Amino acid sequence: MGSGNKRASRKGGARRKFNIRRKLLLYITAVMLVTTLLLTGVFWNTSLFHEIKLEKESQLAEVAQVLETIKNNETLNAEVRGLFVEDYLNRLRLVRSLLESNLHGNADPAKWQNIADTVDVAAIHVIGSDGVIVQSSAPASIGLDFYAHPELAEFIPLIESNSREAYYVDMEGISITTGHQQVYMGLRSDYMGGSVIQLEISMDDLYDYEDAYNIKWYVSTIPTRRYRTIFVVDGTTDELLGISENNKQTLEIDDRLETLRTALEEPQVIQVNGESQVVYVEEYNGMLIGCASTMAQLMENVKAYMVVVALCLVGLSALVGITLYFLIDWLMLRKVEEINSGLVRFVSGESDVMFGPGNTNELSELAENLNKVLGAIQVTGTRLAQVVNGMSQEVEAYEYYPELNQFFFSDHLLELMNMTEKECKDKIVEVFEKQRLRGEELGAEIVENVEYYITKDGRLLHIHRTVSYNASYAFVEDVSAQRDREDMLRQDLRHSEERSYVDELTGLSNRRRLAEYLEQWKKQNPKGRGVMLMMDLDNFKMVNDTAGHAEGDRLLRLFAQLLNHQFREGDIKARLGGDEFVVFLPLYVAPKEVERRGRRFLETVRQELREYYTKYHVSVSIGVAYMDENCPDLDTLGERADAAMYIAKRSGKDSLYIDGSSILKT
């Protein structure tokens, strides 16, 4: 009977064991399932709230930007016709300059039309002192007598004026020849002994100016996402003034004005075009400016990543549940208690601790690895300390055993490398893996390398590292002092070079020499008159990009030689840097003589550098400025010469422009 009771007890124990395992599994599954559902619901609500919050913030920003632009456009719209007149008056002055400088006598209609196309106008007319159009890009207008047409009488005072700066603008003129409404602008000129130059401008050009500041046009050009709409509604008439172009072009809302005004203080969910949308509105100057985003799209945005989140939560819950189940398993607990007991004994000073195999491969491997760790710990720390203590104070060391994932640092290694323990370990593992792969590629069991590392506080460390398949150790030395000495030597050398007055590439004076020369010249000649020529090589970048910097340097040297040959020894020639050069003539030279010399120099450059001129279109743009009573200081002189040079560039390059004069092209 006693034996039977023992068997029954064992069966009861087995049943209890089975029931505990089953209940444990059911409880863990139920807890994980409920947790997953709760987390999914919380995450959904949080994500949707966050998505709506982000959308509201985006709406606030977009509406603020639109409002700011509308305010700016209102300011500019009041000035748009003034801007239009100023723009075309500048074009009219350009035409006058071209006529007075480059045309003599009559020109054929093709040339007139070419000038009209250049300044982008419908037609150009020249009105003689007798009020008759004598030249025109529109031949049908030649012979038209302003005195014979009362509707043209508004231009008579301009025709009879003697002021060179007199002009007249007719924003709603009617063409005598075509009957079309046009804009007419006239300006007095010395061309042909005294005349009026008149521009005929299409009304479409004026409308284009005004459209640039139109609310409807501006709002329609705002790029938006498909589910977001920008709109502007008249706050009095309920008229839809503008709506972003890539959206539905209607804004159907019950009691639209009243409903929109509910979203003035805070974005609201409103039925727009038959669907729920988040709407935010601001009121300005009688207009309601707003942004609407569809709720459906916002929910779709959340659904897109909620599916992934839900799957991750289910997987994570399953993993946690299974892990808990096996961790609580009494067989594992028993082995863990055995290991814990052994470690306690080892820490207490018992040196002959060994762990036997466990009930699973994992536990057996754990016991084996712990035996390795305990053996390594017994000798590693002492050995590393002894090695480092025998070296310089700036040297530290570490050892790493990847199989054990164990790190051993000398006392001050972390302080020397200015790292946290985690940062240092991550860096050691990263380097070990790279060197291990390199050793496999080379077929070497041991790989050594030397590298330099800059710490967060700027110190330079010299690291000598040795890596094998199962270990890595390194010595780290602080060489910052040596680096600082080398930096000081390089800095001294650079300062010495900067003190030089000569451009190393071309042999010309450098910027520093030029500045000192001009300053000394100004002191010696307070009322002296001189000429500055600012030069820039056109298309020089193409030479560098196509033929290389060596060829570009050769071109710069050749150009420097031309400067030395073409200008007097007493003129200072300097290279400012890149492809910019300056020649300063310390004596007054008349503009005519400057033009003559400039024409000769431009021609010489084309001849002597014809290889570059032909292949890369290399030429020279020259800006000229005079040091005289109108230009009292060197800074102004340089600015005017530089501005003149860029006028020459914008006028087609390969040309010379004298400050306050006209373009000289050859």
Image (cartoon, grey):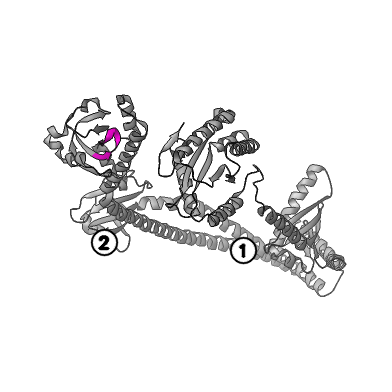
Circle 1: element type = helix
> In which quarter of the view is residue 322 placed?
bottom right
Question: Is residue 354 visible in the rendered structure shown here?
Answer: no
Image point 85% across, 73% down: which residue? 350
Screen quadrant of the N terminus: bottom right
Please name the amino acid that badge 1 sits on: Asn
Looking at the image, the residue that sits furthest to the bottom is 348
Viewer-side residue, 218 vs 81: 81
Within the magenta stretch, is there residue 600?
A: no
Q: Secondary structure at mark 2?
A: loop
Q: What residue is shown with label 1? A: 19
* Mark 2 neighbour class, 10 Å CA radius: few under 14, some 14 to 19, many 20 or more: some
Q: According to the image, label 2 marks what residue?
A: 262
- The foreground one among 110 and 371 is 110
- The span picked out in magenta is 185-196
Which amino acid type corresponds to the residue marked 2 in the rendered image? Thr
Is tag 1's residue or tag 2's residue first in the polypeptide sequence? 1
Q: Label 1: few (<14), some or many (≥20) within 10 Å? A: few
Q: Nearer the viewer, residue 52 or 180?
A: 180
The answer to whether residue 193 is magenta is yes
Q: Position of residue 656 (x, y in %)?
A: 47, 38
- Residue 464 picture quarter: bottom right
